[in-house]
Image (spheres, helix red, strand yellow):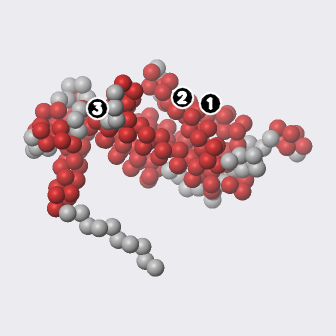
C-alpha cells in the first residue's frame, strides 16, 4: 500500500504560511543587522510589507516571534547536522557524544540573547504561549534525537539500560548545563568534557567488566 498523500493546503492556508515565513525571514534579517533589542515589531511588519495587526495575529509578542524563529532554525539545522549513526560510531559513548556535539554546536551558535528572551518568556508567562511551546517542542525534539541514536546502539547497551529512560537522563544533564550557560559566561562547548565523562560512566561497560578484561 502506498502512503496517503497530505491534503493540499487551501489558498488561505498558503497565504498564511507565506506571510508567516516572510515575517520570520525579515525578523532574522533585522535582528542580525541591528540587534534584537533595537528591532521593533513595527519595523518587522513594515519590512514584510504587512500591517502590525497582521503580525500580531501570528505572534502576539516579540518573544513569541523569536520563539517561532528559533524553533524553525534550530530544528532545521539539527535535522541536517546530525552525523551518521552506528556505522560511523562503534560504541554507544562515541555515537551519542557525536549527537551531543551537534546539538551543542547548533544551540551555541544561535543568539544567546534570543534564547535568554525565550526562556524567560516561557518561565514567566501565566498561560500557554509560543515560548512555552517552543521549549516543550525543543525538549521533545532533542530527547528523540538521543533516543534514536541509543536505539542504533541497542545491542551494545548494558542490559540494565532502557533507551527511553537513558535518553531522558542524558537530556536532563544537558538541559541543566545549558541553563547554566544561559545564565553565565563562556562558550556552550565548555560543557562537552563534562558530558563525555558522564556518558562514559553511563554508557560504558560496568567497572567489574572493565577490570576482568
Residue at the front extreme? 127
What secondary structure is marked by label 1? helix
Q: Residue at x 34, y 27 (%)?
A: 126
25 versus 153 height, above or below: above
The picture quadrant where one finds residue 132 is top left
Q: Which residue is under mark 2?
A: 177
Q: Residue 152: image x %, image y %?
A: 63, 56
Q: Residue at x 26, y 67 (%)?
A: 8
The picture quadrant where one finds residue 193 is top right
Q: Which residue is under mark 1?
A: 194
Say which mark, if any, is on residue 63.
Answer: 3
What secondary structure is marked by label 2? helix
Whole-angstrom CA distance, mark 2 to mark 1, is 9 Å
| Residue neighbourhood size for the residue with mark 3, other residues' Cα within 10 Å, grouped as few (<14), some (14–19), many (≥20) | many
Q: Are marks 2 and 1 in contact (CB under 8 Å)?
A: yes
3 or 2: tag closer to the N-terminus: 3
Amino acid at each position: 500500500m502506498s502512503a496517503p498523500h497530505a491534503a493540499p493546503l487551501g489558498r488561505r492556508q498558503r497565504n498564511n504560511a507565506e506571510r508567516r515565513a516572510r515575517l520570520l525571514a525579515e525578523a532574522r534579517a533585522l535582528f542580525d543587522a541591528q540587534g534584537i533589542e533595537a528591532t521593533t515589531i513595527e519595523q518587522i511588519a513594515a519590512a514584510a510589507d504587512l500591517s502590525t495587526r497582521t503580525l500580531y495575529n501570528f505572534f502576539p509578542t516579540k518573544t513569541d516571534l523569536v520563539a517561532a524563529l528559533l524553533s524553525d532554525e534550530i530544528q532545521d539545522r539539527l535535522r541536517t547536522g546530525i552525523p551518521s549513526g552506528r556505522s560511523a560510531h562503534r560504541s554507544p559513548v562515541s555515537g551519542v557524544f557525536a549527537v551531543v556535539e551537534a546539538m551543542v554546536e547548533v544551540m551555541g551558535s544561535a543568539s544567546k540573547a534570543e534564547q535568554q528572551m525565550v526562556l524567560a518568556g516561557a518561565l514567566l508567562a501565566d498561560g500557554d504561549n509560543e515560548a512555552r511551546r517552543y521549549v516543550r517542542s525543543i525538549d521533545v525534539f532533542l530527547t528523540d534525537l538521543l533516543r534514536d541514536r541509543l536505539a542504533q546502539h541497542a545491542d551494545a547497551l548494558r542490559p540494565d539500560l532502557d533507551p527511553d529512560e537513558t535518553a531522558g537522563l542524558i537530556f536532563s544533564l544537558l538541559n541543566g548545563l545549558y541553563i547554566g550557560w544561559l545564565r553565565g559566561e563562556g562558550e556552550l562547548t565548555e560543557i562537552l568534557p563534562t558530558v563525555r565523562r558522564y556518558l562514559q560512566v553511563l554508557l560504558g561497560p560496568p567497572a567489574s567488566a572493565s577490570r576482568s578484561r
